[in-house]
Amino acid sequence: MSPLTITTRDAAPGPVLEITGDLDYMTAPELRTAVAGLSLTAGHLLVLDLAALEFCDSSGISALLAARNVVMEHDCGLALAAVPANTARILSIVGLDQVFTLHADVSAATARTSARH
Amino acid sequence: MMCRTDQVPEPGEGQDVDATDAVFTSLLEDSAEELYEEAPCGYVSTLMDGTIAKINATLLAWLGLERSEVVGRKRFADLLTVGGRLYHETHFAPMLQMQGAVSGIAMDIKTAAGRMPVLVTSKVKTTEEGEPLLIRTTVFDARDRRAYESELLRRRTVAEEARRQAEADRARLQEALAVLQQNLLPAELPTIPGLEAGSYYHTASPDLLGGDFYDLFPLETGRWAFFLGDVCGKGPQAAAVTSLTRYTLRAAALHNPDPVTVLTTLNTVLHERYTSGDPRYCTAIYGVLDLTGEHVGVHLASGGHPPALIQRTDGSADYLPTPGGMLIGVLPQAHFSATRTDLLPGETLLLYTDGLTEARTGPQRERYGDDALREFTAARPGHGPQALIAALTGLLASFGTGLDDDTALLALGVPAPLPTTVSES
Protein backbone atom coordinates (compact mmCIF):
# COMPACT_ATOMS: atom_id res chain seq x y z
CA MET A 1 0.00 0.00 0.00
CA SER A 2 1.34 3.39 -0.98
CA PRO A 3 0.59 6.76 0.53
CA LEU A 4 -1.33 9.25 -1.57
CA THR A 5 0.29 12.43 -2.84
CA ILE A 6 -1.51 15.07 -4.83
CA THR A 7 0.34 17.83 -6.67
CA THR A 8 -1.41 20.68 -8.40
CA ARG A 9 -0.24 22.60 -11.41
CA ASP A 10 -1.93 24.92 -13.86
CA ALA A 11 -2.42 24.18 -17.51
CA ALA A 12 -4.11 26.25 -20.19
CA PRO A 13 -7.66 24.95 -19.74
CA GLY A 14 -7.49 24.77 -15.95
CA PRO A 15 -5.83 23.00 -12.99
CA VAL A 16 -4.19 19.59 -13.29
CA LEU A 17 -4.06 17.34 -10.21
CA GLU A 18 -1.41 14.67 -10.36
CA ILE A 19 -2.52 11.79 -8.15
CA THR A 20 0.12 9.33 -6.99
CA GLY A 21 -0.33 6.20 -4.85
CA ASP A 22 -3.46 4.55 -3.46
CA LEU A 23 -6.84 6.24 -3.53
CA ASP A 24 -8.84 4.31 -0.94
CA TYR A 25 -10.97 4.59 2.18
CA MET A 26 -8.10 6.13 4.14
CA THR A 27 -6.83 8.59 1.51
CA ALA A 28 -9.93 9.52 -0.50
CA PRO A 29 -10.70 12.52 1.78
CA GLU A 30 -7.38 14.05 0.67
CA LEU A 31 -8.59 14.22 -2.91
CA ARG A 32 -11.86 15.78 -1.80
CA THR A 33 -9.93 18.39 0.19
CA ALA A 34 -7.62 19.11 -2.72
CA VAL A 35 -10.54 19.59 -5.13
CA ALA A 36 -12.46 21.72 -2.63
CA GLY A 37 -9.39 23.97 -2.31
CA LEU A 38 -9.19 24.73 -6.05
CA SER A 39 -10.32 28.10 -7.31
CA LEU A 40 -12.43 27.16 -10.29
CA THR A 41 -14.06 29.60 -12.65
CA ALA A 42 -16.75 28.72 -15.11
CA GLY A 43 -15.43 27.07 -18.23
CA HIS A 44 -12.32 25.63 -16.57
CA LEU A 45 -11.37 22.06 -17.17
CA LEU A 46 -10.07 20.12 -14.19
CA VAL A 47 -7.78 17.31 -15.28
CA LEU A 48 -6.98 14.46 -12.89
CA ASP A 49 -3.73 12.87 -13.97
CA LEU A 50 -3.96 9.24 -12.85
CA ALA A 51 -0.80 7.94 -14.51
CA ALA A 52 0.76 7.14 -11.12
CA LEU A 53 -2.45 5.97 -9.43
CA GLU A 54 -1.66 2.55 -8.06
CA PHE A 55 -5.01 1.54 -6.62
CA CYS A 56 -8.52 2.93 -6.49
CA ASP A 57 -11.31 1.35 -4.44
CA SER A 58 -14.95 2.29 -4.09
CA SER A 59 -14.07 5.19 -1.77
CA GLY A 60 -11.67 6.41 -4.45
CA ILE A 61 -14.41 6.16 -7.08
CA SER A 62 -16.61 8.06 -4.66
CA ALA A 63 -14.00 10.82 -4.39
CA LEU A 64 -13.81 11.02 -8.20
CA LEU A 65 -17.60 11.41 -8.31
CA ALA A 66 -17.44 14.06 -5.57
CA ALA A 67 -14.86 15.90 -7.70
CA ARG A 68 -17.25 15.66 -10.63
CA ASN A 69 -20.05 17.16 -8.52
CA VAL A 70 -17.81 20.05 -7.46
CA VAL A 71 -16.68 20.97 -10.98
CA MET A 72 -20.24 20.72 -12.29
CA GLU A 73 -21.41 23.11 -9.57
CA HIS A 74 -18.81 25.58 -10.85
CA ASP A 75 -19.93 25.02 -14.44
CA CYS A 76 -16.58 23.44 -15.18
CA GLY A 77 -15.53 20.22 -16.85
CA LEU A 78 -13.65 17.17 -15.53
CA ALA A 79 -11.36 14.88 -17.44
CA LEU A 80 -9.44 11.82 -16.29
CA ALA A 81 -6.08 11.35 -17.94
CA ALA A 82 -3.94 8.21 -18.21
CA VAL A 83 -6.31 6.00 -16.25
CA PRO A 84 -4.43 2.81 -15.26
CA ALA A 85 -5.80 -0.43 -16.67
CA ASN A 86 -7.13 -1.81 -13.39
CA THR A 87 -8.94 1.42 -12.53
CA ALA A 88 -10.27 1.67 -16.09
CA ARG A 89 -11.61 -1.85 -15.63
CA ILE A 90 -13.37 -0.86 -12.41
CA LEU A 91 -14.80 2.27 -14.06
CA SER A 92 -16.08 0.07 -16.86
CA ILE A 93 -17.64 -2.44 -14.40
CA VAL A 94 -19.50 0.34 -12.64
CA GLY A 95 -20.48 2.03 -15.89
CA LEU A 96 -18.60 5.22 -15.09
CA ASP A 97 -16.61 5.07 -18.32
CA GLN A 98 -19.84 6.52 -19.74
CA VAL A 99 -19.85 9.31 -17.14
CA PHE A 100 -16.24 10.47 -17.00
CA THR A 101 -14.35 11.83 -19.95
CA LEU A 102 -11.21 9.72 -20.35
CA HIS A 103 -8.02 10.67 -22.14
CA ALA A 104 -4.86 8.76 -22.93
CA ASP A 105 -2.65 11.34 -21.21
CA VAL A 106 -2.61 14.87 -19.81
CA SER A 107 -1.57 16.55 -23.04
CA ALA A 108 -4.49 14.94 -24.83
CA ALA A 109 -6.80 16.13 -22.05
CA THR A 110 -5.51 19.71 -21.96
CA ALA A 111 -5.44 19.98 -25.74
CA ARG A 112 -9.20 20.07 -25.70
CA THR A 113 -10.29 23.59 -26.41
CA SER A 114 -13.80 23.16 -25.13
CA ALA A 115 -13.78 22.54 -21.42
CA ARG A 116 -17.47 21.94 -21.18
CA HIS A 117 -18.39 18.45 -20.27
CA MET B 1 33.58 25.85 55.00
CA MET B 2 35.53 23.63 52.63
CA CYS B 3 38.11 26.25 51.66
CA ARG B 4 38.91 27.13 55.21
CA THR B 5 41.55 24.47 55.67
CA ASP B 6 44.17 26.53 53.85
CA GLN B 7 43.38 29.70 55.67
CA VAL B 8 45.00 30.94 58.78
CA PRO B 9 42.48 30.79 61.57
CA GLU B 10 41.13 34.21 62.29
CA PRO B 11 41.46 35.48 65.79
CA GLY B 12 38.47 34.65 67.94
CA GLU B 13 37.19 31.84 65.74
CA GLY B 14 37.66 29.24 68.46
CA GLN B 15 35.59 31.40 70.74
CA ASP B 16 32.72 31.47 68.20
CA VAL B 17 32.61 27.68 68.04
CA ASP B 18 32.58 27.46 71.79
CA ALA B 19 29.68 29.94 71.91
CA THR B 20 27.64 27.89 69.40
CA ASP B 21 28.25 24.72 71.36
CA ALA B 22 27.05 26.52 74.46
CA VAL B 23 23.81 27.48 72.72
CA PHE B 24 23.26 23.85 71.61
CA THR B 25 24.03 22.59 75.09
CA SER B 26 21.51 24.93 76.64
CA LEU B 27 18.93 23.90 74.07
CA LEU B 28 19.62 20.23 74.67
CA GLU B 29 19.72 20.55 78.47
CA ASP B 30 18.18 17.52 80.15
CA SER B 31 18.10 16.20 76.57
CA ALA B 32 17.63 12.52 77.28
CA GLU B 33 14.56 12.90 79.45
CA GLU B 34 13.12 15.75 77.37
CA LEU B 35 13.71 13.87 74.13
CA TYR B 36 12.13 10.73 75.55
CA GLU B 37 9.01 12.42 76.84
CA GLU B 38 8.36 14.91 74.06
CA ALA B 39 9.69 12.94 71.10
CA PRO B 40 7.67 13.19 67.89
CA CYS B 41 6.82 9.50 68.31
CA GLY B 42 5.41 7.41 71.12
CA TYR B 43 7.75 5.35 73.32
CA VAL B 44 6.63 2.50 75.48
CA SER B 45 8.59 -0.17 77.30
CA THR B 46 6.92 -3.31 78.57
CA LEU B 47 7.81 -6.40 80.46
CA MET B 48 7.97 -9.59 78.49
CA ASP B 49 4.32 -10.27 79.35
CA GLY B 50 3.35 -6.91 77.83
CA THR B 51 2.77 -5.03 81.09
CA ILE B 52 3.63 -1.39 80.48
CA ALA B 53 6.62 -0.31 82.54
CA LYS B 54 7.36 3.06 80.99
CA ILE B 55 5.55 5.29 78.51
CA ASN B 56 6.31 8.76 77.15
CA ALA B 57 4.15 11.86 77.26
CA THR B 58 3.60 11.94 73.51
CA LEU B 59 1.94 8.53 73.52
CA LEU B 60 -0.05 9.31 76.65
CA ALA B 61 -1.33 12.48 74.98
CA TRP B 62 -2.42 10.49 71.92
CA LEU B 63 -4.14 7.94 74.13
CA GLY B 64 -5.72 10.63 76.31
CA LEU B 65 -4.62 8.71 79.42
CA GLU B 66 -2.76 9.59 82.61
CA ARG B 67 0.50 7.85 83.35
CA SER B 68 -0.98 6.42 86.54
CA GLU B 69 -3.76 4.71 84.58
CA VAL B 70 -1.27 2.94 82.35
CA VAL B 71 2.00 2.05 83.99
CA GLY B 72 1.78 -1.30 85.73
CA ARG B 73 -1.94 -1.46 84.97
CA LYS B 74 -2.24 -1.99 81.26
CA ARG B 75 -0.53 -4.19 78.73
CA PHE B 76 0.56 -2.89 75.34
CA ALA B 77 -2.22 -4.87 73.68
CA ASP B 78 -4.77 -2.96 75.79
CA LEU B 79 -3.84 0.21 73.92
CA LEU B 80 -4.90 -1.34 70.60
CA THR B 81 -8.31 -1.56 68.95
CA VAL B 82 -9.98 -4.98 68.89
CA GLY B 83 -8.63 -5.68 65.42
CA GLY B 84 -5.19 -4.46 66.42
CA ARG B 85 -5.23 -6.63 69.54
CA LEU B 86 -6.12 -9.68 67.50
CA TYR B 87 -3.33 -8.99 65.05
CA HIS B 88 -0.92 -8.35 67.92
CA GLU B 89 -1.76 -11.65 69.50
CA THR B 90 -1.70 -13.77 66.36
CA HIS B 91 1.16 -12.19 64.44
CA PHE B 92 3.00 -9.40 66.15
CA ALA B 93 3.83 -11.03 69.48
CA PRO B 94 4.87 -14.40 67.95
CA MET B 95 7.08 -12.65 65.38
CA LEU B 96 8.66 -10.58 68.11
CA GLN B 97 9.30 -13.68 70.15
CA MET B 98 10.91 -15.48 67.24
CA GLN B 99 12.90 -12.63 65.67
CA GLY B 100 13.49 -10.34 68.61
CA ALA B 101 12.32 -7.36 66.55
CA VAL B 102 9.35 -6.36 64.44
CA SER B 103 9.36 -3.28 62.27
CA GLY B 104 6.80 -0.90 60.84
CA ILE B 105 3.58 -2.81 61.46
CA ALA B 106 0.41 -0.83 60.76
CA MET B 107 -2.12 -1.02 63.59
CA ASP B 108 -4.74 1.20 65.21
CA ILE B 109 -4.56 2.43 68.80
CA LYS B 110 -7.56 3.52 70.83
CA THR B 111 -7.61 7.24 71.55
CA ALA B 112 -10.04 9.60 73.23
CA ALA B 113 -11.20 10.71 69.78
CA GLY B 114 -11.58 7.15 68.47
CA ARG B 115 -8.97 5.20 66.62
CA MET B 116 -5.64 6.40 65.35
CA PRO B 117 -3.57 4.63 62.72
CA VAL B 118 0.03 4.04 63.80
CA LEU B 119 3.14 2.19 62.71
CA VAL B 120 4.62 0.05 65.47
CA THR B 121 8.21 -1.08 65.78
CA SER B 122 9.36 -3.25 68.71
CA LYS B 123 12.68 -4.64 69.80
CA VAL B 124 13.46 -7.01 72.66
CA LYS B 125 16.20 -5.94 75.05
CA THR B 126 18.24 -8.86 76.33
CA THR B 127 20.82 -9.45 79.03
CA GLU B 128 24.39 -10.08 78.05
CA GLU B 129 23.58 -13.77 78.25
CA GLY B 130 20.74 -13.26 75.77
CA GLU B 131 17.91 -13.54 78.28
CA PRO B 132 14.99 -11.31 77.22
CA LEU B 133 14.45 -8.45 79.65
CA LEU B 134 11.88 -6.12 78.19
CA ILE B 135 10.33 -4.88 74.97
CA ARG B 136 10.97 -1.40 73.65
CA THR B 137 8.38 -0.09 71.27
CA THR B 138 8.11 3.04 69.15
CA VAL B 139 4.73 4.17 67.87
CA PHE B 140 4.60 6.50 64.85
CA ASP B 141 1.62 8.62 63.91
CA ALA B 142 0.38 7.24 60.56
CA ARG B 143 -2.75 9.35 60.19
CA ASP B 144 -1.49 11.42 57.22
CA ARG B 145 0.01 8.37 55.61
CA ARG B 146 -3.23 6.43 56.03
CA ALA B 147 -5.22 9.36 54.62
CA TYR B 148 -2.86 9.47 51.64
CA GLU B 149 -3.25 5.73 51.11
CA SER B 150 -7.02 6.05 51.34
CA GLU B 151 -6.94 8.82 48.79
CA LEU B 152 -4.85 6.67 46.45
CA LEU B 153 -7.24 3.80 46.96
CA ARG B 154 -10.25 6.05 46.39
CA ARG B 155 -8.77 7.40 43.17
CA ARG B 156 -8.02 3.91 41.98
CA THR B 157 -11.60 2.90 42.72
CA VAL B 158 -12.87 5.93 40.81
CA ALA B 159 -10.59 5.11 37.87
CA GLU B 160 -11.70 1.49 37.88
CA GLU B 161 -15.32 2.54 38.01
CA ALA B 162 -14.75 4.84 35.03
CA ARG B 163 -13.06 2.03 33.14
CA ARG B 164 -15.91 -0.34 33.96
CA GLN B 165 -18.39 2.26 32.78
CA ALA B 166 -16.46 2.79 29.55
CA GLU B 167 -16.35 -0.94 28.92
CA ALA B 168 -20.08 -1.24 29.60
CA ASP B 169 -20.77 1.66 27.22
CA ARG B 170 -18.60 0.05 24.59
CA ALA B 171 -20.35 -3.29 25.00
CA ARG B 172 -23.73 -1.60 24.71
CA LEU B 173 -22.64 0.26 21.58
CA GLN B 174 -21.34 -2.94 20.01
CA GLU B 175 -24.59 -4.66 20.85
CA ALA B 176 -26.53 -1.84 19.19
CA LEU B 177 -24.27 -1.97 16.15
CA ALA B 178 -24.70 -5.74 15.93
CA VAL B 179 -28.49 -5.36 16.03
CA LEU B 180 -28.35 -2.71 13.30
CA GLN B 181 -26.03 -4.90 11.26
CA GLN B 182 -28.40 -7.85 11.63
CA ASN B 183 -31.21 -5.61 10.40
CA LEU B 184 -29.31 -5.14 7.13
CA LEU B 185 -29.29 -8.88 6.44
CA PRO B 186 -31.92 -11.58 6.61
CA ALA B 187 -31.78 -13.47 9.91
CA GLU B 188 -31.78 -16.66 7.88
CA LEU B 189 -32.39 -17.53 4.27
CA PRO B 190 -35.83 -18.93 3.48
CA THR B 191 -36.23 -22.60 2.65
CA ILE B 192 -37.24 -22.92 -0.98
CA PRO B 193 -38.42 -26.25 -2.44
CA GLY B 194 -36.22 -27.26 -5.37
CA LEU B 195 -33.58 -24.68 -4.54
CA GLU B 196 -30.58 -24.58 -2.24
CA ALA B 197 -29.21 -21.32 -0.91
CA GLY B 198 -26.15 -20.39 1.12
CA SER B 199 -24.74 -17.11 2.35
CA TYR B 200 -21.86 -15.69 4.34
CA TYR B 201 -21.04 -12.30 5.73
CA HIS B 202 -17.60 -11.26 6.85
CA THR B 203 -17.40 -8.11 8.98
CA ALA B 204 -14.05 -6.40 8.71
CA SER B 205 -14.51 -4.40 11.91
CA PRO B 206 -17.01 -4.81 14.76
CA ASP B 207 -16.97 -1.02 15.21
CA LEU B 208 -17.79 -0.14 11.64
CA LEU B 209 -21.15 -1.09 10.26
CA GLY B 210 -20.66 -2.75 6.93
CA GLY B 211 -22.15 -1.59 3.70
CA ASP B 212 -22.66 -5.02 2.14
CA PHE B 213 -26.14 -6.50 1.94
CA TYR B 214 -28.08 -9.37 0.42
CA ASP B 215 -31.56 -10.86 0.58
CA LEU B 216 -33.73 -13.65 -0.83
CA PHE B 217 -37.51 -13.39 -0.63
CA PRO B 218 -40.65 -14.70 -2.34
CA LEU B 219 -42.57 -13.05 -5.14
CA GLU B 220 -45.68 -14.77 -6.50
CA THR B 221 -45.88 -18.57 -6.57
CA GLY B 222 -42.71 -20.22 -7.85
CA ARG B 223 -40.78 -17.01 -8.24
CA TRP B 224 -38.20 -15.63 -5.86
CA ALA B 225 -36.25 -12.41 -5.85
CA PHE B 226 -32.66 -12.05 -4.70
CA PHE B 227 -30.15 -9.27 -4.44
CA LEU B 228 -26.66 -8.63 -3.21
CA GLY B 229 -24.81 -5.35 -3.16
CA ASP B 230 -22.30 -3.02 -1.65
CA VAL B 231 -22.89 0.52 -0.45
CA CYS B 232 -19.91 2.80 -0.85
CA GLY B 233 -18.22 3.58 2.42
CA LYS B 234 -18.53 2.34 5.97
CA GLY B 235 -20.06 3.34 9.25
CA PRO B 236 -23.47 4.72 10.20
CA GLN B 237 -23.88 6.77 7.00
CA ALA B 238 -23.27 3.69 4.85
CA ALA B 239 -25.61 1.64 7.04
CA ALA B 240 -28.36 4.22 6.54
CA VAL B 241 -27.94 3.91 2.76
CA THR B 242 -27.86 0.12 3.06
CA SER B 243 -31.12 0.12 4.99
CA LEU B 244 -32.79 2.44 2.47
CA THR B 245 -31.46 0.30 -0.39
CA ARG B 246 -32.62 -2.99 1.06
CA TYR B 247 -36.18 -1.88 1.74
CA THR B 248 -36.46 -0.01 -1.56
CA LEU B 249 -35.41 -3.15 -3.44
CA ARG B 250 -37.92 -5.32 -1.57
CA ALA B 251 -40.77 -2.87 -2.10
CA ALA B 252 -39.90 -2.27 -5.75
CA ALA B 253 -39.69 -6.02 -6.42
CA LEU B 254 -43.18 -6.57 -5.07
CA HIS B 255 -44.51 -3.77 -7.26
CA ASN B 256 -42.79 -4.90 -10.47
CA PRO B 257 -40.11 -7.59 -10.24
CA ASP B 258 -38.45 -6.83 -13.58
CA PRO B 259 -34.71 -6.44 -12.75
CA VAL B 260 -34.05 -3.30 -14.78
CA THR B 261 -37.21 -1.66 -13.43
CA VAL B 262 -36.26 -2.49 -9.83
CA LEU B 263 -32.72 -1.10 -10.18
CA THR B 264 -34.06 1.99 -11.94
CA THR B 265 -36.41 2.61 -9.02
CA LEU B 266 -33.55 2.21 -6.57
CA ASN B 267 -31.43 4.60 -8.64
CA THR B 268 -34.17 7.24 -8.52
CA VAL B 269 -34.63 6.84 -4.77
CA LEU B 270 -30.91 7.02 -3.93
CA HIS B 271 -30.23 9.87 -6.32
CA GLU B 272 -33.03 11.97 -4.90
CA ARG B 273 -32.10 11.19 -1.32
CA TYR B 274 -28.40 11.97 -1.72
CA THR B 275 -28.45 14.47 -4.53
CA SER B 276 -26.38 17.14 -2.79
CA GLY B 277 -23.08 17.03 -0.99
CA ASP B 278 -21.38 13.70 -0.51
CA PRO B 279 -22.38 11.20 -3.16
CA ARG B 280 -23.91 8.06 -1.70
CA TYR B 281 -24.33 5.20 -4.06
CA CYS B 282 -24.24 1.44 -4.23
CA THR B 283 -23.57 -1.40 -6.57
CA ALA B 284 -26.00 -4.29 -6.69
CA ILE B 285 -27.16 -7.30 -8.58
CA TYR B 286 -30.87 -7.91 -8.41
CA GLY B 287 -32.58 -10.88 -10.02
CA VAL B 288 -35.54 -13.19 -10.15
CA LEU B 289 -35.50 -16.98 -9.97
CA ASP B 290 -38.28 -18.74 -11.85
CA LEU B 291 -38.87 -22.22 -10.50
CA THR B 292 -42.00 -22.91 -12.50
CA GLY B 293 -40.26 -24.25 -15.62
CA GLU B 294 -38.17 -27.32 -16.35
CA HIS B 295 -34.96 -25.51 -15.40
CA VAL B 296 -34.53 -22.72 -12.91
CA GLY B 297 -34.66 -19.52 -14.90
CA VAL B 298 -32.42 -16.67 -13.77
CA HIS B 299 -33.15 -13.12 -14.87
CA LEU B 300 -30.87 -10.56 -13.33
CA ALA B 301 -29.53 -7.06 -13.79
CA SER B 302 -26.46 -5.37 -12.43
CA GLY B 303 -25.82 -1.83 -11.41
CA GLY B 304 -22.07 -1.40 -11.34
CA HIS B 305 -21.54 -4.67 -9.49
CA PRO B 306 -18.92 -7.34 -10.23
CA PRO B 307 -20.50 -10.00 -12.44
CA ALA B 308 -22.15 -13.07 -11.00
CA LEU B 309 -20.30 -16.35 -11.39
CA ILE B 310 -21.86 -19.65 -12.35
CA GLN B 311 -20.28 -22.90 -11.24
CA ARG B 312 -21.06 -25.48 -13.93
CA THR B 313 -21.33 -29.21 -13.47
CA ASP B 314 -18.53 -29.90 -15.97
CA GLY B 315 -15.83 -28.36 -13.76
CA SER B 316 -15.93 -24.94 -15.34
CA ALA B 317 -17.10 -21.58 -14.08
CA ASP B 318 -18.29 -18.61 -16.11
CA TYR B 319 -18.95 -15.01 -15.28
CA LEU B 320 -22.36 -13.76 -16.28
CA PRO B 321 -21.60 -10.38 -17.84
CA THR B 322 -23.98 -7.48 -17.57
CA PRO B 323 -22.01 -4.78 -19.41
CA GLY B 324 -22.68 -1.14 -18.91
CA GLY B 325 -24.71 -1.47 -15.74
CA MET B 326 -23.99 1.76 -13.88
CA LEU B 327 -23.40 2.61 -10.26
CA ILE B 328 -26.77 3.11 -8.61
CA GLY B 329 -27.63 6.58 -7.33
CA VAL B 330 -24.98 8.61 -9.17
CA LEU B 331 -26.89 9.94 -12.15
CA PRO B 332 -30.53 10.94 -12.47
CA GLN B 333 -30.86 8.61 -15.46
CA ALA B 334 -28.86 5.43 -15.21
CA HIS B 335 -28.52 2.56 -17.61
CA PHE B 336 -28.83 -1.03 -16.40
CA SER B 337 -28.52 -4.15 -18.47
CA ALA B 338 -30.20 -7.44 -17.78
CA THR B 339 -29.29 -10.96 -18.75
CA ARG B 340 -30.92 -14.38 -18.57
CA THR B 341 -29.60 -17.84 -18.01
CA ASP B 342 -30.79 -21.24 -16.81
CA LEU B 343 -29.42 -23.10 -13.84
CA LEU B 344 -29.16 -26.82 -14.49
CA PRO B 345 -29.26 -29.31 -11.65
CA GLY B 346 -25.92 -29.15 -9.83
CA GLU B 347 -25.12 -25.64 -11.03
CA THR B 348 -24.64 -22.77 -8.60
CA LEU B 349 -24.99 -19.04 -9.09
CA LEU B 350 -22.57 -17.06 -6.92
CA LEU B 351 -22.96 -13.40 -6.01
CA TYR B 352 -20.17 -11.70 -4.06
CA THR B 353 -18.90 -8.27 -3.11
CA ASP B 354 -15.47 -7.01 -4.05
CA GLY B 355 -14.09 -7.62 -0.56
CA LEU B 356 -13.41 -11.10 -1.95
CA THR B 357 -11.75 -10.17 -5.25
CA GLU B 358 -9.94 -7.13 -3.85
CA ALA B 359 -8.42 -9.01 -0.88
CA ARG B 360 -4.63 -8.87 -0.82
CA THR B 361 -2.88 -12.20 -1.06
CA GLY B 362 0.56 -13.69 -1.15
CA PRO B 363 3.93 -12.15 -0.37
CA GLN B 364 3.41 -9.41 -2.98
CA ARG B 365 0.08 -8.48 -1.39
CA GLU B 366 -1.57 -8.69 -4.79
CA ARG B 367 -5.31 -8.44 -5.28
CA TYR B 368 -6.98 -11.83 -5.37
CA GLY B 369 -8.74 -10.98 -8.62
CA ASP B 370 -11.51 -12.26 -10.87
CA ASP B 371 -9.46 -14.96 -12.59
CA ALA B 372 -8.39 -16.51 -9.30
CA LEU B 373 -12.00 -16.58 -8.11
CA ARG B 374 -13.14 -18.28 -11.31
CA GLU B 375 -10.36 -20.86 -11.11
CA PHE B 376 -11.06 -21.49 -7.42
CA THR B 377 -14.77 -22.00 -8.11
CA ALA B 378 -14.18 -24.19 -11.17
CA ALA B 379 -11.80 -26.38 -9.18
CA ARG B 380 -14.43 -27.14 -6.49
CA PRO B 381 -16.71 -30.10 -7.06
CA GLY B 382 -20.27 -29.04 -7.78
CA HIS B 383 -21.69 -29.98 -4.40
CA GLY B 384 -24.13 -27.11 -4.30
CA PRO B 385 -24.34 -23.60 -2.86
CA GLN B 386 -23.65 -24.45 0.77
CA ALA B 387 -20.54 -26.46 -0.09
CA LEU B 388 -19.32 -23.58 -2.28
CA ILE B 389 -19.98 -21.04 0.47
CA ALA B 390 -18.10 -23.25 2.94
CA ALA B 391 -15.13 -23.45 0.56
CA LEU B 392 -15.15 -19.68 0.00
CA THR B 393 -15.44 -19.05 3.75
CA GLY B 394 -12.27 -21.07 4.16
CA LEU B 395 -10.65 -19.08 1.35
CA LEU B 396 -11.56 -15.78 3.02
CA ALA B 397 -10.16 -17.03 6.33
CA SER B 398 -6.91 -17.95 4.57
CA PHE B 399 -6.50 -14.31 3.45
CA GLY B 400 -6.00 -13.30 7.10
CA THR B 401 -5.25 -9.58 7.36
CA GLY B 402 -5.29 -9.33 3.58
CA LEU B 403 -9.07 -9.30 3.82
CA ASP B 404 -9.60 -5.73 4.94
CA ASP B 405 -13.13 -5.08 3.70
CA ASP B 406 -16.56 -6.44 4.47
CA THR B 407 -17.49 -9.31 2.23
CA ALA B 408 -20.90 -10.76 1.44
CA LEU B 409 -21.52 -14.02 -0.42
CA LEU B 410 -24.81 -15.41 -1.67
CA ALA B 411 -25.00 -18.70 -3.58
CA LEU B 412 -28.13 -20.10 -5.18
CA GLY B 413 -28.38 -23.44 -6.92
CA VAL B 414 -30.39 -26.38 -7.99
CA PRO B 415 -29.60 -29.55 -6.07
CA ALA B 416 -28.09 -32.26 -8.26
CA PRO B 417 -30.46 -35.20 -8.82
CA LEU B 418 -29.88 -38.15 -6.55
CA PRO B 419 -27.66 -40.71 -8.25
CA THR B 420 -29.80 -43.34 -9.93
CA THR B 421 -27.23 -46.07 -9.49
CA VAL B 422 -25.79 -47.10 -6.18
CA SER B 423 -22.08 -46.42 -6.14
CA GLU B 424 -19.76 -49.35 -5.66
CA SER B 425 -18.85 -49.96 -2.11
Image (cartoon, grey):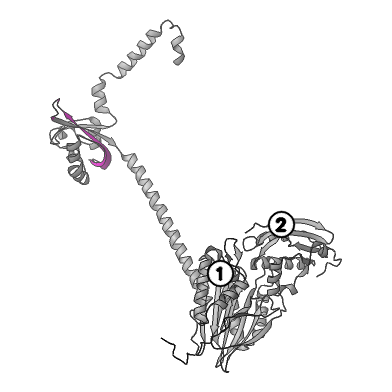
In the displayed structure, B24 sits above or below B120; it is above
Residue bearing the label numbered 2:
A6
Residue segment shown in magenta? B104-131
Query: What residue sits 48% from the left and 80% below the top?
Result: B188
Q: Specify whether disc 1 shares its chain with disc 2.
A: no
* Residue B423 location (% of width, % of height): 44, 88
Q: Outermost residue, right direction?
A: A113
Of B252 and B352, nearer the camera is B352
Look at the image and tell me in which quarter the C terminus of chain B lies: bottom left
* Residue B396 location (% of width, % of height): 53, 70
Of B61 and A75, nearer the camera is A75
Query: What residue sits 24% from the left and 26% below the top?
Result: B36
* Residue B246 location (% of width, % of height): 58, 79
Of A41 and B56, nearer the camera is A41
Residue bearing the label numbered 1:
B406
* Residue A23 location (% of width, % of height): 66, 62
Chain letter of the residue carrying label 2: A
Magenta span: helix, strand or loop, mainly? strand
Q: Quadrant of residue B249?
A: bottom right
Q: Residues within 10 Å of mark 1 (few under 14, many from 20)?
A: many
Chain letter of the residue carrying label 1: B
Is residue B130 in the magenta section?
Answer: yes
Is residue B248 in the magenta section?
Answer: no
Residue B1: in sight, yes or no? Answer: no
Q: Amino acid at mark 2?
A: Ile
Q: Residues within 10 Å of mark 2 (few under 14, many from 20)?
A: some
Residue B161: in sight, yes or no? Answer: yes
Q: Is residue B81 left or right of residue B151?
A: left
Q: Quadrant of residue A2?
A: bottom right
Tag 1 near tag 2, CB within 8 Å: no
Q: Amino acid at mark 1?
A: Asp
